[in-house]
Image (cartoon, helix red, strand yellow):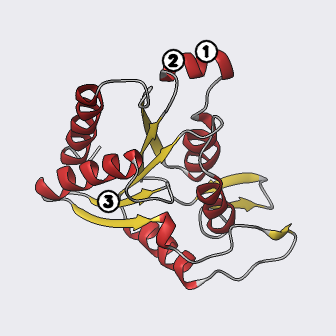
Amino acid sequence: MKRILLVLGHTASDSYSGRLADAYESGARSAGHEVVRVNLGDLRFDPVLREGYRRVQDLEPDLKMVQEHILWADHLVFVYPNWWCTMPALLKGLFDRIWLPGFAFNFDKQTKHLIKRLTGKTGRVVIAIGTQSPFMTWWRFGDFTNEISHAILGFAGVKTSVTAVGPSDRVTPDVREGWVEKVRSLGARGR
């Protein structure tokens, strides 16, 4: 059994992304996994790095809590919609604020090597695409999963898999329900 942190990266829990997160959570809990869920829209924090990385910006309590959950978890799951070929701004702001040296990574100044502080953890990213298929989005605009899977999670050592579904705005309810069941199955398997 795994300890799973599930983050809904859509600000609205009653969205299709929220439905996918609900499915993942119910599948994981029914299989006996321990799940902590964070709904991004419920958190209180400033998503803007006011001075970039020149000065440490104190973390709000909700951000400290998310960091604690990340350290606790074996498996990290992020569910969000694809907006302009990337994650919603608030989710990006979460990473900007918490994905810091000393937490997610370090640089060894002597060897000039990256130390990945979250190695050993696994991750799953579930992305709902509204108007195009995942393939057509990739074909037209490039790899819209690279930022989160490689440049954020992978940079810290999290081995990440991606599940993209869509076009969620242009299919029948039965197709959408099939994707919900697929995500529920991922949760049950802790993947």
**CA separation, marks 1 and 3?**
32 Å
User: What crowding class fits label 2: few (fewer than 14 Cα within 10 Å), some (14-19), or many (20 or more)?
Assistant: some
Q: Which residue shows up at 62% across the image and 40% down it?
A: 86
Q: Which residue shows up at 29% across the image and 43% down it?
A: 191
User: In the figure, residue 95 lies in which quadrant?
Assistant: bottom right
User: What crowding class fits label 1: few (fewer than 14 Cα within 10 Å), some (14-19), or many (20 or more)?
Assistant: few
Q: Which residue shows up at 32% across the image and 59% down it?
A: 4
Which residue, given by chain and number where applicable, does mark 3 sit on? 4
Which amino acid does the dot numbered 2 rest on? Phe
Contact between marks 1 and 3 (CB within 8 A): the answer is no
**Does 114 sit above or below residue 47?**
above
Q: Earlier in the sequence, mark 2 or mark 3?
A: 3
Which residue, given by chain and number where applicable, does mark 2 sit on? 135
Q: Which residue shows up at 27% across the image and 64% down it?
A: 35
**CA separation, marks 1 and 2?**
6 Å
Q: Position of residue 88 (x, y in %)?
A: 60, 50
Contact between marks 1 and 2 (CB within 8 A): the answer is yes
Which amino acid does the dot numbered 1 rest on? Trp
Which residue, given by chain and number where applicable, does mark 1 sit on? 139
Q: Position of residue 16 (x, y in %)?
A: 38, 45
Residue placed most toward the observer, 174 or 3: 174
* Quadrant location of the N terminus in the rendered image: bottom left
